Amino acid sequence: MRKNAFIISCMFLALAWGGKVIASAEADSRFPETAAILQILYADQLSASRTHWAYAQKAHAENHFDIECLFSALAASESVHVDNFQKLLSDLGVEVEDDPESEISVSSTKFNLKITLNIDLAGIDQKYLLLIEKIKPEGHESAIGNITYAWQAAQQYRELVNQAYSALKSFLGLGKSPDEFFVCWICGSTVADIPREQCPICKGPISNYEEATPKWRFYDAINDNELLTDEEKACAKRIFDLIYYHQEKDSDIAIDRNIFDSDLYKKWGLGPKREFSIEEQIYIMGLLDMAAMWEEYNSINPDDLDESQKQYLEEMREKYGPGPLNLREEIRKKEGKLSEAQEAVLDLIEALCGHEEFGDVELIFFAARQAKQ
């Protein structure tokens, strides 16, 4: 009776958290219980990934950067399980369509950790054991294996979240939480240190582990964009880093829906519309300016400068030396400090070119950007 009650409660959870499930005419009738349980876990992991991503954003806003990394890793790991469960459902002839994302309740980082530990991860051993026992008679080994992966990964979450929560609530600051996490993109194993020999969950090679930084979704989207060159991808990531660490974040950003159909977004964008982080929204809103600056920067030909540009370069060399110049340091030496406008322009140019040493092209671009301010 308890098992049935647990399964029924999970079904309600799946309905509440999203994901329309459509069984096609070719749905495999040999695995009805397996398909039902996979539907439950797909919805559960999708909701958990979205929630932990929201928690990561809150931790970032509160300057808990180590916990931001932790929640980002949990979200990344859960996205692995979402993909695995979706593939299994597809193989069973069951199609999944995501519902619009529901609102997520976010509190303080400390309370978010407490909720994750005492509610979300409470009873995971009983939960997964019951689900696996439910589908064992049907003998779908891949489903059993992937559900076991999710279970073992959840046990890792519990240990990591407990460590972070203990460190955060310690008034004496005696605890310490890791600030780097790695996720196996096969099974979702989540660790603070990459194993020496093999993944402890799926037993795969450690090359399957990648660092799950708070920027993993952005990086993944940019890496998957086949319209960008490697140089353009690197530039987009540097621009995003600049936004992520330096720009003040506005919580009320309205993205024009038309941008998603534009050629500009198709080239520089982040794929289908989803729940974008504040930093991603800022990036999207600035695509027009970023693309224009990239084109302007790359259009500068040091062998074809006009007289005013040549004169400007001579003046800069006389003032700061022959170069290449670390203009930020040179201005500080001569003038004591940089203005906010100069800092902003230099940050932008360094993000565009990828280095601090400025040659003729960067100096000309610096002059052009200052003239526009």
Image (tube, rainbow, N blue to C red):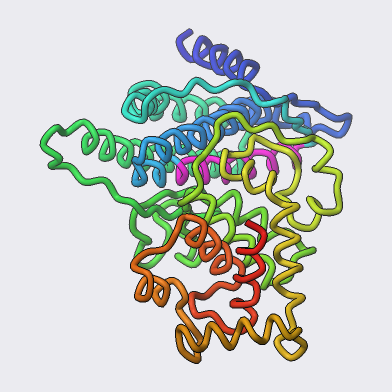
Magenta segment includes 81: yes
Q: Residue at x 53, y 40 (%)?
A: 78
Q: Is residue 122 visible?
A: no
Q: Is residue 64 above or below residue 125?
A: below
For residue 349, what is the image quadrant? Answer: bottom right
Where 150 sits versus 353, above or below?
above
Which residues are the magenta region?
Answer: 72-92
Is 47 a magenta residue?
A: no
Asked whether residue 13 is in view, the answer is yes
Location of residue 230 (image quadrant):
bottom right
Which quarter of the figure is the C terminus placed in? bottom right
Q: Nearer the viewer, residue 270 or 160?
A: 270
222 left or right, relative to 357 = right
Q: Is residue 257 above or below residue 233?
A: above
Q: In the depicted view, which residue is nearer to us: 34 or 277? A: 277
Which x, y percent locates residue 292? 75, 61
**Left or right placement of residue 28 versus residue 45 in this view:** right
Q: Main secondary structure of the magenta part?
A: helix
- Quadrant for residue 160, please give it: top left
In the rendering, at what x and y percent does residue 219 appear? Answer: 60, 56
Residue in the picture at 50% in, 62% down? 342
